[in-house]
Image: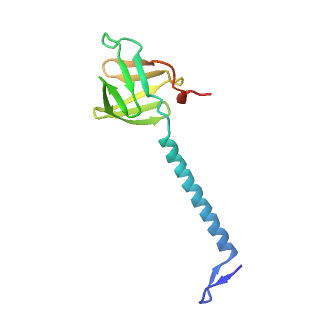
């Protein structure tokens, strides 16, 4: 399968067609991998969403944390929040700053470290949402 141009040069040979198809296949595979990675990251279930209650009193009172998909709910107001999820660590960024939370493997306990207080433990209020349950 040899095709010549009008000037007598060889345009297509079996080897060129083979390498062209191989290069196209690799490009498609890389594109699909990149798309899958981006799509998977955008569809990750946020394990911190829900209501949490402190296990021990914090300065004499029980503290509650309430996270929604769009942000933190504090005193009945929604504070826009950006979540960054890396395995069991969730970085919550608001206009007040960034806070690091670590969630347990069973996704029922949340740990946070606060200055002058140390490590605080929060327990999920209510059952684990269905999208977080593992079979």
- In the rendered view, would you say 37 is above or below 18? above
* Residue furthest front as drawn: 76
Task: Say if 76 sits above or below 16 in the image.
Answer: above
The quadrant of the rendering that contains the N terminus is: bottom right
Q: Residue furthest bottom?
A: 7
The colour scheme of the drawn protein is rainbow
Q: Quadrant of residue 82?
A: top left
- The answer to which of 129 and 88 lies nearer the viewer is 129
Q: Quadrant of residue 71?
A: top left
For this orientation, the residue located farthest to the left is 96
Residue at the image point whose x is 54% and y is 27% from the top: 130
51 and 84: which is toward the camera = 51
- Most extreme residue toward the top, as rendered? 60
Q: Name the spot of residue 72 as percent of width and height, x first.
A: 35, 29
Quadrant in the picture for residue 19: bottom right
Q: Please state if 115 lies on the left or on the right of 15 as rendered.
A: left
Q: How many marks?
A: 0
Residue 43 x %, y %: 50, 40
Going 36% across and 18% down the picture, which residue do you hit?
64
Relative placement, left or right, of 75 versus 85 is: left
Q: Looking at the image, which residue is at 43% across and 25% down?
A: 50
| Residue 35 location (% of width, % of height) | 52, 51
Above or below — where is 131 with respect to 38? above
Residue 32 or residue 68, whichever sits in front: 68
Residue 57 % position (x, y): 36, 11
Q: Quadrant of the C terminus?
A: top right
């Amino acid at each position: 399968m040899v095709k010549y141009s009008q000037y007598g040069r060889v345009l297509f040979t079996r080897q060129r067609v083979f390498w062209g198809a191989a290069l196209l296949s690799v490009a498609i595979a890389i594109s699909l991998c990149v798309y899958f990675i981006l799509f998977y990251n955008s569809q990750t279930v946020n394990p911190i969403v829900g209501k949490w209650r402190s296990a021990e009193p914090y300065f004499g009172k029980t503290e509650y944390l309430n996270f929604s998909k769009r942000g933190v709910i504090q005193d009945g107001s929604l504070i826009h929040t950006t979540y960054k999820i890396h395995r069991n660590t969730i970085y919550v960024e608001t206009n007040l700053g960034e806070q690091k939370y670590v969630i347990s493997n069973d996704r029922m306990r949340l740990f946070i470290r606060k200055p002058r207080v140390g490590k605080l433990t929060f327990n999920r209020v209510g059952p684990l949402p269905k999208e977080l349950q593992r079979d």
